Amino acid sequence: MLILTCPNCGVAADETELSAGGEAHLTRYGAGSSDADFETYMFMRKNARGVHFERWRHSYGCGKWFHAARCTTTLEVFGTYPAQTTEPPAELIEKIKQKRPDFEGFSK
Amino acid sequence: MRRYSAFAIAREAARYHSGWERAWASPEPKSEYDVIIVGAGGHGLATAYYLGKNFGITNVAIIEKGWLGGGNTGRNTTIIRSNYLQDPSAAIYEKARSLYETMSQDLNYNVMFSPRGVMMLAQTEHEIRGYQRTAHANALQGVATEFIGPQKVKELCPIIELKGPRYPVLGALWQPRGGTARHDAVAWGYARACSDMGMHIIQKCEVTGVHQDKGEVTGVQTTKGRIGCKKLGMVVAGNASALADMAGFRIPLESVALQALVSEPVKPCMDVVVMANTVHGYLSQSDKGEMVIGGGTDGFNNYTQRGSFHHIEETVRALVETFPMISRLKMLRQWGGIVDVTGDRSPIIGKTPLGNTFINCGWGTGGFKAIPGSGWAFAETIAKGAPGELAAPFGMDRFIEGRFIDESVAAGVAH
């Protein structure tokens, strides 16, 4: 079972306490944007095989959203961070690079 | 290829079974093929088979990183049905179901297709209305289904509890010609037939790169070297995004884990397939006597072919409610597969941004039942360079056009 530490309330929460929210840091496009941009926002996903940045909600805890960096091939959790950001924190990227030398860093 | 028959068994019995051939050859790859299919699961092998059978294209290689049929083809609950709401889905799944009817004769390989009947339980008022609507839609589509009441449900499946603690059984959508088949045999049967046509099945050969020139694919880089091709078909289910990434485009799907489990074998007690979508579980009995159990997917992206333990608990809890007699059964085995789920829960079959490359993916949690129909439609797409009638609605362009084939609502959970 996945255990993620919620950066909002500090609880190390079991997977059953959390809801997965999909890929993080998507660029949002709304009314007036092109069809291609809107399709990218709505449907196109990296679906990374390896390091994945994603949104989670501490549904049965504090109820707040946060972000996590996780490996989709080993389920290793690299870390969690608050949702009020547009990209992962630099020290987390550094930590992932040490564990995964092939990781090229975060890209949109 | 020597045909399998009662006579062949007698002949081999008379000579101590010394004359059986290997079902398929394992050649080294050639430098170039007319068509390369990446992925030797059910869908990939069926595609190759119908390329040969329907279009006479036999200079084909099917490349597989593991062993054939070792992905989702060998990890599903073998349910076959075509009771879908939307017309394009009903058309392709009914094509598949009808091909399953004659597959054993067609391939000269016993795939043990058992049209034992599939029922999807209605356990809320909304489900009753939904399934009645589907039954009417199926009548228009020419798919034989009917909405039945609780008494008929009990007659068809005596071990069911109609008055469960949370959700009573109020009726069911019944498809008498749905059922199950032996999943491995489907892959093996297609592989044997493909090999017989001279196609190369290359196992333990992982694609590591896609060679391109002027917007066309010229070949693939593999762990067994570079293999050239004139056309490329990608049929790799949960790894579709990873392969598309190598080819330089993105596809609208996500990979998640779906689990199944089987109980210890018991005497025959259930000769239909039951899907309970409200409580979230489905059950059938295999020919060995094991109760075959399937449930829902995990919520997060995953490539590990393992699912979360708490989902097993949820699934089993739901089924114990519906079938109290299974409460003391021991579970023997549990496994997971990586399914590729699209936004509208319908597959993607069609062209890619690369001119001579085609993709067949996104079958999500319901690919096994579609294998022959998917292969049939994708072979036509590759052979003609454009999708035919069956595949046309499933193009990737439907997401930009908003032309969804919305089965996420229509099919409920157990897709």
Image (spheres, grey):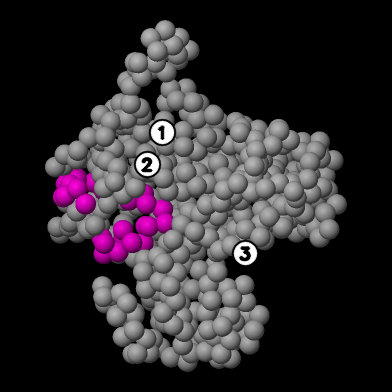
Residue at screen point 62% across, 55% down:
B295
Q: Are marks 2 and 3 in contact (CB under 8 Å)?
A: no
> Nearest the camera: A94 or B272?
A94
Separation of disc 2 and disc 3 at Cα? 30 Å
Q: Position of residue A13 (x, y in %)?
A: 58, 80
Q: Position of residue B335 (x, y in %)?
A: 52, 52
Badge 3 element: helix
Reading the image, the residue beneath label 2 is B68
In this view, B393 is above or below B182: below
Is residue B80 on the magenta stretch?
A: no
Q: Is residue B410 above or below residue B100?
A: below
In which chain is the residue bearing label 3? B
Residue B106 visible? The answer is no
**Element at label 2:** loop
* Quarter location, residue A58: bottom right
Please state which amino acid type lies under the numbered disc 1. Answer: Trp
Amino acid under disc 2: Leu
Crowding near the residue tagged with mark 1, few <14, some 14–19, many ≥20 C-alpha atoms within 10 Å: many
Front-lying residue, B308 or B197: B308
Instruction: Answer above or below: position of B387 versus B196.
Output: below
Secondary structure of residue under mark 1: helix
Q: Residue at 67% of width from left, 48% of height from top?
A: B330
Label for residue A91? none
Comparing A40 with B241, the one in front is B241
Q: Which mark is residue B188?
A: 1
Q: Chain of mark 2?
A: B
**Of callouts 1 and 2, which one flags the residue occurring earlier in the amino acid sequence?**
2
The residue indicated by pointer 3 is B310
Question: Is disc 1 in contact with disc 2, using a CB cutoff of under 8 Å?
Answer: yes
